[in-house]
Each structure stands twice: as C-alpha cells, then as structure tokens.
Amino acid sequence: APSAAPATFQEKISQTMNKLRDSSDKAEPPSPFGDFDDPAMAQMMKELEGLMGTGDLDGVLEGVMEQMLSKELLQEPLKELAGKYPTWLADNESKVPEEDMVKYRKQLSIIEEILAIYDRSGSAQPTSEESKRVVELMQQMQDCGNPPAEIWEELAPGM
C-alpha cells in the first residue's frame, strides 16, 4: 500500500535521501550514479559518490541539500509561491488566527530573502556562503510549518 504523502519539508528530504540510498543499493559498479541524463543531477550524484567514500555524512548531506536548494531548481517555484502569498494574505486576514498569519507573513519574508539571494547571485549556482544561507532560511521556513493549504493545493495538487 502506498504511504501517505509527506507533510513536511523534513519528511520530503528524508524520503528523497531514502530514494537515493535505494537507487545506490541497486546500481552497478563502478559508478552507482552514472546513468543520469540531467547534467545537474549527474554532477550532484558524482559529488555524492565521492563524498560517500569519505565517511563524512554531514558533508554528504550538506552537499545534497545545497544541490537540492540550488537557484536552478528553486527560483521559479519560489517566485510562483511568493506571487500567491500577498493576495492570499489580504483575502484571509480576517479569517485566519493572527498567530497563523504571523507565520505566513514570515514565510513570505523568508521566500523573498531567498529570492533576493538568487537574484544577487551572478551564476546558476550560488556561492557556498549563499547556499548555506539558503539552507538556514529553508530551515526557518520549515519551522513556520506548511504554506497555507489553498496555496499549497494550487502549486502541488494532491500533495
């Protein structure tokens, strides 16, 4: 039976890491990650493969997170998400408890800060310092909980 859809960013990361682990268990030597068509994914897998041999799990996870939070992957979805918040906030200000509105406003602020980092970054891949800041901001975003259900449903129907 299929499991329930992950409810939090942390669960999604865990699910992704499990899928990566499963695929690496099934892959054949010499390179368990060699058959990816997407160049960015192939590069990430190559780096992951190199890190797996070092025993530096924190480094592996940090590298994977930096790749997953890259400008190339996140900028457009975050722009779309940021574009939906102002109208939703205005339409729901009197309907949603103030405590929740504070969290949703903070989410929008975090998204805008991430987008500003991506806008300032001259390349497709932000610097290591910028990537670390994006990771911190995504953690703060996760701490705020999920985006409003209506926005989430528009962006990811069925999630």
Image (cartoon, rainbow, N blue to C red):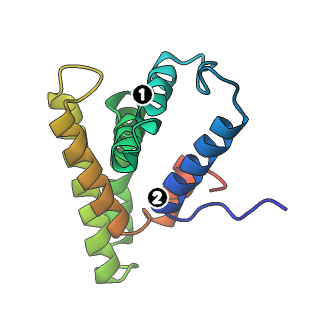
Viewer-closest of 150 and 147? 147
User: Where is 23 relative to 43, above or below?
Assistant: below
Viewer-closest of 128 and 99? 128
Q: Residue at x 45, y 35 (%)?
A: 53
Count the marks.
Answer: 2
Q: Residue at x 64, y 18 (%)?
A: 35
- Does residue 29 appear left or right of residue 120 in this picture? right
Residue 82 visible in the displayed image: yes
User: Where is 74 relative to 32, above or below?
Assistant: below
The N terminus - image quarter = bottom right
Q: Residues within 10 Å of mark 1 (few under 14, many from 20)?
A: some
Identify the mark nearer the N-term, 2 or 1.
Answer: 2
Q: Mark 2 points at which residue?
A: 9
Q: Name the residue under label 1.
A: 47
User: Where is 96 relative to 134, above or below?
Assistant: below
Task: Farthest residue to the right: give it.
Answer: 1
Where disc 2 sits, the SS reads helix
Disc assigned to residue 78: none
